[in-house]
Amino acid sequence: MDVRLLIDSSRLPVLQLRFEGTEAMHYELGPLICRAEGFRDVFMGVYRPPYQFTTPGYDGGKYPPPFYRYTWTIKTSKYEATELVFPQYDVVHYASYNAIPECRNVVTLRAQEGDSKPVVFTRQTSPPYYVSDGSEMVMNLTLTTCNQDSHLRRRKGFKASIRRADCPGTYVGTGENKGITYIRTICGVIASKEYPFPYNYYISSHMSNEYTHSWILQVFRNYVIRLEFNDFDIPPDPGAKNCTPESGILWVYNGIGTSSERLIGGFCNLNRKGILYSTSNYMTLVFSTRWKRTGNGRGFQAVFSAELQQEEITTCAEPLGIESGEISNLQMMASSNENEENYFFTNGRLNSPSGWCATFQDSAKEFTVDFWELVTVNGIVLQGLKGASKRTAVKRFYISFSNNSLVWKFEEEPIGRQKIYVCDQCEFDNYTNDLEIRFDFLKPISTRNVQIKILEYYRQPCLRLEILGCKGKDVPQLSLSLGSILRHSNILEGNDVYFECNISANPWVSETGWRFEGHELVTNISAGVIVSNQNLVLQNVQRSNRGKYSCTATNSESQGESNHVYLRVQYSPVCKQNQETTYRATLHYPVQISCEVEADPDDVEFHWEFKSSSGNLKLVSSYTSGTKSVVNYIPISESDFGTLQCWGSNSVGSQRVPCLFFVIPAGGLLLSTMCIYRILEITNG
């Protein structure tokens, strides 16, 4: 097939042709129809997240009529990070649309965040993906319909969801070629260019197909960066043993710069990782590829956050008994069996002497395990067919989960679609059918039934498997602690504080939460509070953040709560509220003026001054104890009535704003002796 048909308008119109390349390149060429009256614009309303919406007629299976433009407006408030995903996306786009400017794009997304430059995504047969940065935002999503051929398969439209994001987006999917994105935040979402459907590159003399973009990530001092990939698809060239910039590679460096001594690794589907850590508060990423006509991967989507480096989690990833025989034959079943003697489903255990094979005619090709109880599963290990002379392996598959064998749920990718697993190792020259290939699930899942569905395979739909996880039911056990580099005695106002909530639970928890003094704590970016599952970050802590913290987690058994950790925040003295500030005094008689402050530590040194027009006079306190100081003040003349200032200082620092006390005459009026004599003289006269 000559792919230039798709972009060469001189070779159109074509009445009927279907072309299929990668997922991002499905086109149907239909008759080119022109309209003189243009498009009808329909405004669908203004909405705020969380909100889910569909195209008109979606629930009834009807696609919107041709030559309409439907626009939805989404508004978000400041400090509210949101994510746009499309769980379903089935739109009409013929290649002939490319010859009509207003029909070229089916979906257009325009997002205006604060005063920044608008972000615009245009899509045809693949949906956009977008995460806002937490600024006040107005997003317009427009669906454009053009001519439709009733003889072709009926489309449904789309279902879109705008939902709150745990971390703000940071120029997601917009990195320009040879550009650098600098990001300084507590946590954020990043994604490669045009994720998750990078365009297929068509050779042109006006542009280069080579692409490189860099990200420099920075979090606050004394922390490291945790980079977690929620989706990663950078395919190597077929048969390649190494990742290369020609096929696509993501270089990750510790710190700033790309020197070899800083290199953490260069990654593609051959050696991809789930989580990476820096050893400083900086990390540099460089994504290099060469866009191809077909075969471009989805790229990557990741969340980075400020955390403490942890050891790799290995708990709850043990074999659950399929290979060992602990799972009986009664707990396994298959949709079909190619040969009941050699390739029956009971031979589908890892390292068995043969394997399970579905029939070629079986449209389901499913293998199911029933654990007879709730377990937590984390991954699956696959092998090919034992004894086969040629490569026999599962190339693409997905996993479903159920608690009753009736209602099944699938894993959801960050963009809202079903997760499809691909066996890249099956392409290697050194692959053997006995090679154990491990696939880690996106997150731990509590389930009774696990089902694998074969979508694509080499030679025969056969496999041997083991499922990884842990058994046993228990209420979540939680342990809360401050980040290990923090000391309770050294936390000062203005510092950043990090809590870790360690959880042990089976079934795995479905919900986590945080509490402060018994009240629920949620993310509030403006207040410096970042809640992210098992982590809590408090930025620029103040004395109002002092108190008891705990974390909670809930599974199907019950809810558990951690120990309470009291956060002590040391601060310089401040005036105590609601203390007496006005004192009445008589000339030549002492008056005791008390100054109280709040401070941590409470070992405070005080300083007193009398403020007058002729200058400030230092005073000596007569009594000091902890956070309280008393001075005996004697006004000698009328000029001694006025304002006294009191400062405190401790090991943290000096008081910024002094406490003020006002000394006034006991009679309430400040009159000179001559005025008093004159009043008496007039009265007696």
Image (spheres, helix red, strand yellow):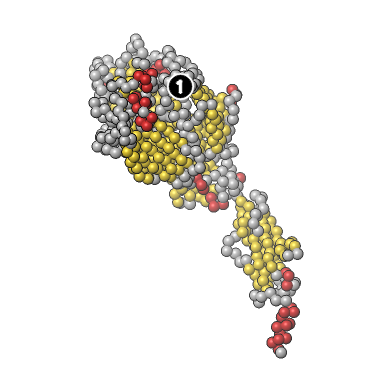
Q: Amino acid under label 1?
A: Trp
Choose top left, top right, bottom left or bottom right for residue 230. top left
Q: Estimate the x, y position of residue 64 in percent, counting from the top left.
A: 28, 35
Nearest the eye: 466 or 78 = 78
Q: Total of numbered circles in the picture?
A: 1
- Which quadrant of the rendered structure holds the C terminus? bottom right
Quick check: 168 left or right of 349?
right
Q: In the rendered image of this protein, does residue 318 appear above or below residue 684? A: above
Nearest the eye: 515 or 194 = 194
Task: State the residue at coordinates (35%, 22%).
Answer: 396
Q: In the rendered image of this protein, does residue 229 appear above or below residue 53? A: above
Q: Estimate the x, y position of residue 112 in percent, counting from the top left.
A: 46, 40
Camera sees residue 373: no
Task: State the residue at coordinates (24%, 37%).
Answer: 60
Task: State the residue at coordinates (69%, 68%).
Answer: 642
Give the residue number, with chain letter if any, for mark 1. 291
Quick check: 47 left or right of 286?
left
Q: Residue furthest top?
A: 389
Q: Estimate the x, y position of residue 277 in percent, counting from the top left.
A: 53, 31
> Which class describes the residues within 10 Å of circle 1: few (<14), some (14-19), or many (20+)?
many
Camera sees residue 654: yes
Q: Residue furthest front?
A: 36
Nearest the eye: 515 or 125 = 125
Q: Say what secondary structure mark 1 lies in.
A: loop
Q: In the rendered image of this protein, does residue 333 appear above or below residue 78? A: above
- Which quadrant of the rendered structure holds the N terminus? top left
